[in-house]
Image (cartoon, coloured by chain):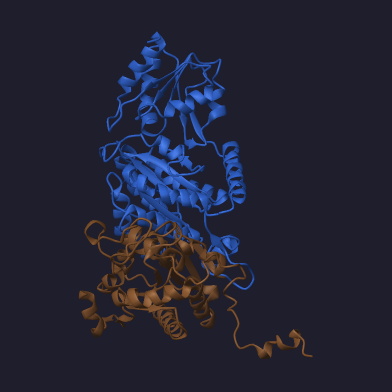
Chain colours: A brown, B blue
Amino acid sequence: MMDIKDIVKEENLVYTKTKLMTDNILSYCPGCGHGTAHRIVMEVIDELGLQSQTVGIAPVGCSVLAYDFMNIDMIQAAHGRAPAVATGVKRTMPDKYVFTYQGDGDLAAIGTAETIHVCNRGENITMIFINNGIYGMTGGQMAPTTLEGMKTSTSPYGRDLKSMGNPLKITELIAQLPGTYYVTRQAVHTPAAVRKTKKAVFKAFEVQKEKKGISFIEIVSNCNSGWKMSPVKSNEWMVEHMFPFYPMGDIKVDGELVKSNKAEVKS
Amino acid sequence: MGELKLMKGNEAIAEAAIRAGVDAYFGYPITPQSEVIEYLMAEQPEERTGMVVLQAESELAAINMVYGAAAAGKKVFTSSSSPGISLYQEGISYIAGAELPCVIANVVRGGPGLGTIQPSQADYFQSTKGGGHGDYKLYVLAPASVQEMADFIQLGFDIAYKYRNPVMIQSDGMIGQMMEKVELADQRPRWTDEEIKQMHDSWAAFGKGDHRERNIITSLDLDSAKQEKHNHHLQAKYRRMEEEEVLFEEINCEDAEYLIVAYGSSARISMKSIDLARAKGIKAGLFRPITLYPFPMKQLNAYVGKVKGILSVEMSAGQLIEDIKLAVECNVPVKHFGRYGGMIHSPEEVLTALENLIKGE
């Protein structure tokens, strides 16, 4: 009879967690996309051999504790201020790699000014933007990216555009600024999506290496707890409702707006 | 002897920052201190020493750029004036909570609100009693001359790194705008990356090597027991500052029957007032706190039983007086005098207030 110890051996490993993820138990709800997004960013930094040269900036929101899980030097920023903190780090250490990791409330509501201006200055950093259309950590309130009619704890009858404003396509907005070099929208709900997102994160760090300006990666993600759905249902709902409004794909590549996406800006 | 120059206070503090080997300045223009960033931009310190100067999009961004650079172990300086410093407060609280060293200058103007652009000392409470949220303290230096504007940069960084704590230089529109002779320190080299690594590898976030665990800069701990422990640690640090870092000046205090207590511009004005008083036969002395926090509590308490009365002279409506009363524990009569909202008292007005104190009015 074969013992488990005979099976669990280095040579039999087909997958292992990157050493850039700590052993701390993730604080995210089961089914949430944050864990996958974290892992992708850490895998890329690991595979590029940049652990000793990278500083990450954690936001306020669900991923406020990102530094518990990412095994690199990290700075936890005040709500919305991650791009300013990143600017302070990058300007004084231009040869180090700096990335921000923010949610929609942090990046597109309270930190809108910092987001716009860091992009406008073209700071040579990488920005990871998790858009799940809701405030997860505070318990499911309306976000700037909440879709029309979407029910949250502060829009219990659905988002009413007249009184609550429109969902904000911040990614299309910052893509218009000359300081942004690479802008893309991805997801992490399927193996194929994960592979595409990882490719985008690789590209972003390459852009930073070449000192070409901002790379901005929006990851449309689910919030099964906030949306009050099962993980599977939330991903289906995301594909059905979020993707039409927040379409997948590159928006700006090599400093040029992607033609197919120019039309999307109008929608 | 260092280089002598005739400079505005705002220019002197900017030049002193370059010479102190500061790595970065982040700021947003606001009267009456815009000369700081204007001087730095004109001087091109990037050419002189490699110092970074960046005009941020707002005070919110500026103080968080300071937070980021300080977190990376870099020597970082910023300046603003009252309404801008109000916007800094969130960031200052984070900086104090995360125990990051930096120097912040507040060239105070009259308030509240948008107030006025004229000199004031009405930010005393904001500087010394918190300002932002949570239990924290800044080390607060109050320059009374252009020379001290320059000198307090290096002193400020010495304290900031000794205690890993933000330092506030609380100046005002008068000290910032007036021109005086100033002796400038020689240029200090900026720290090299290797020096920063040697000094700050235990805490700064500049990239994790294999030889150590990752460094995390945060003020968050969801475990309240741990957060309380962190607060105990901060309080112990502040008690140590109170024991070891108090600065003050005494002028004509040996035989004084009456004391004027004043700092910054008010102290400058009051120096003349005590001369006028002495000419009239009043034995008056000036006690000048140089550190507003830690306040010279014991040193002022030593005058209990020696002086008959104390006049708090401040360009604020009764802020400094609270610390004076705490210092003398109600054992000496203390009165307030001051102009505020951007008005500056004359030496004669201070003398009249002192005479009224003596008369018991």
In the picture shown, does residue A120 fall above or below B308?
A: below
Tell me which residue sits at (60%, 36%) in the image.
B243
Q: Quadrant of the N terminus of chain A?
A: bottom right
Residue toward you, B113 or B340 = B113
Q: Quadrant of the C terminus of chain A?
A: bottom left
Residue B274 place in picture, x, y as percent:
40, 21
Query: Left or right: where does residue B140 sit relative to residue A150?
Result: right
Query: Left or right: where does residue A165 sit relative to residue B309?
Result: left
Residue B280 is at least partly visible in this image: yes
In the picture shown, does residue A97 fall above or below B251?
A: below
Residue B162 place in picture, x, y as percent:
57, 49
Residue B123 place in picture, x, y as percent:
38, 37
Q: Quadrant of residue A202?
A: bottom left
Residue toward you, A180 or A198 = A198
Q: Quadrant of residue A250?
A: bottom left
Residue B187 is at least partly visible in this image: no
Q: How many marks?
A: 0
Residue toward you, A195 or A19 = A195
